[in-house]
Amino acid sequence: MKTIKKLFMNRIIFVIVTLLSVGFGLASCNKDTTEEEILKNQLATADSLLKRGGVIKYTVKIVSTANSSILKSKMSIENANVTIYQNNKVYTAITDANGFAIFPDMRIGTAAVNVKLKDHAEVDYVADLTPADNLINLSQGQMVNTVRYASTMVPMFPIAAPGAATITGKVTAELDLTNTVPEPAPNVTVTAKVDVDDPDFVSRYITPTQGTTNSNAGRIIKFAFQDATISTQTDAQGNYTLQVPAALNGLPIKLSVADYQTNQKLYLENDPVDGSFKPGEYTVPIIFSSNTEPSPIPDVKPIYVKVDEPTALVGYILSEASFSFETDAEGGVTSINVTKKGKYTHKPFVNIRNTGEGAILDAVWNATTGEVEGVTIINKGKGYSTTTSYIKAALVTSKRTAQITPVLEKNQLTQLIVTDKGYGYMIRPTVKIVTPYNLVTQPELYSTIDLWTYDLRSVLIVNSGSGFKTTLNFPLTPARIPISSNDFKISALTSQSTIKNLDMGTGKRL
């Protein structure tokens, strides 16, 4: 019993002593340890965690794609600035004469790298510094002290002589649809850009850089150029010149043109301002863009035939009027008597049928009663007979304008074919030739009508005129700036000049 009690007392004393020691230690820590030392210890712990995969000695090797024994003067790869961003730290180095820059204390994971070399396109890329091999059966201390290696070969593309290439060309567009030749397009922005998405570019310049011989450490994940996009504007003749990055075995470059707004000359059937039928040559605003489909080329005929609309009034005859008349020695109508007034919903047209020509008569119509109370002789005409001719007052229930198709042969008007006689013609209509341009001489035409059927009978060509064109619009194929500028591609070779002409097509009318 005494032994148990003694043991219990000893444990109490031990616990008290331990608590006192801890308390003394805490008090000592708060008194002697500074915030700076605590932060330093935390950073050391974090760095130790980063080093769990070992230290990465990373080598950047830059290569100028212009250098070759065939060039008389090579481009220097010395003194390139290489900057790396990793784990909130910035590392910098300068390449030696062989293009090497070494970073001895990197960590596993990704790193953002920027390379600047004189007279070359600035490069940004993201590299994965994680080695392919895994560290196994190693202690923490061994892992921290293990040094592994990663490297990346970085192609640098010249943007100045002697390594750059020159692209020249002409930009054309259909600014005048009244001819068959595309016109030079001035003040168009042309842009050249290294096509990093091109399969040839990836296989030729990116795939070989993906890692060292023994592992994938250093492989490039993303690749971009900061100054490998070059733009210029075409001159008054549509010419442009671009100095672009190049390589000895070719560098894929894609060309594109910016949206371009200007004016276009073309033939239209209708006035673009008010939409009225007025075939002619017009100038309209237009835009050339990869974001819009081109407007169709309007179908405009070289000539049109315009026939006056029927002059008859539309209405109903409730009962017909009848007349008697007298003529002079030449058959001209001298007087008209109304023998039956009839009844009409609208003022009727009065004419003499069967024989004679030229008489113009006007009904005296009572709008209240609908009756014809008399006829006024405006022109007596000639050749009428009281035995074979008779006067009729008429209305039509509908009317339709006649349609005529012209026939041109060797720029001469040879025939007018009545394709639709129309309906409601009680007075001979005027027939005119309408063209999108000015004729040298207007043709003289004469129309005849049938007063029994109220339609157009024929149109005679008295004088065919001159200055016609057999064709007007030309067989242009509607085109546009390609949706993808990859359609304008070129392979830029070092120290060479290439001509690339670009056509923007017909554009979109605004």
Image (tube, rainbow, N blue to C red):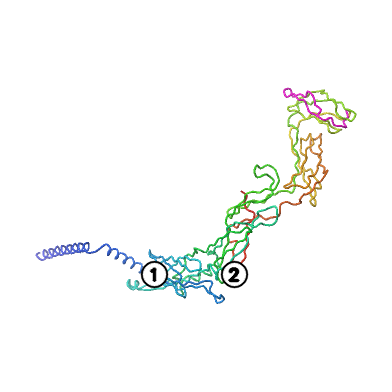
Task: Give the quadrant of the N terminus.
Answer: bottom left
Q: Amino acid under label 2?
A: Gln
Residue 446: % across, % down: 81, 40
Q: Residue furthest left?
A: 2
Residue 389: % across, % down: 86, 30
Q: Picture quarter containing residue 400? A: top right
State whether residue 507 is above or below residue 401: below
State whether residue 59 is above or below residue 184: below
Residue 334: % across, % down: 85, 26
- Seen at 75% across and 36% down, the residue is 310
Q: Which residue is mark 1?
A: 106
**Range of the magenta residues?**
361-386
Is 115 covered by the magenta stretch? no
Q: Which residue is mark 2?
A: 496
State whether residue 201 is above or below residue 483: below
- Seen at 67% across and 44% down, the residue is 271
Residue 454: % across, % down: 79, 35
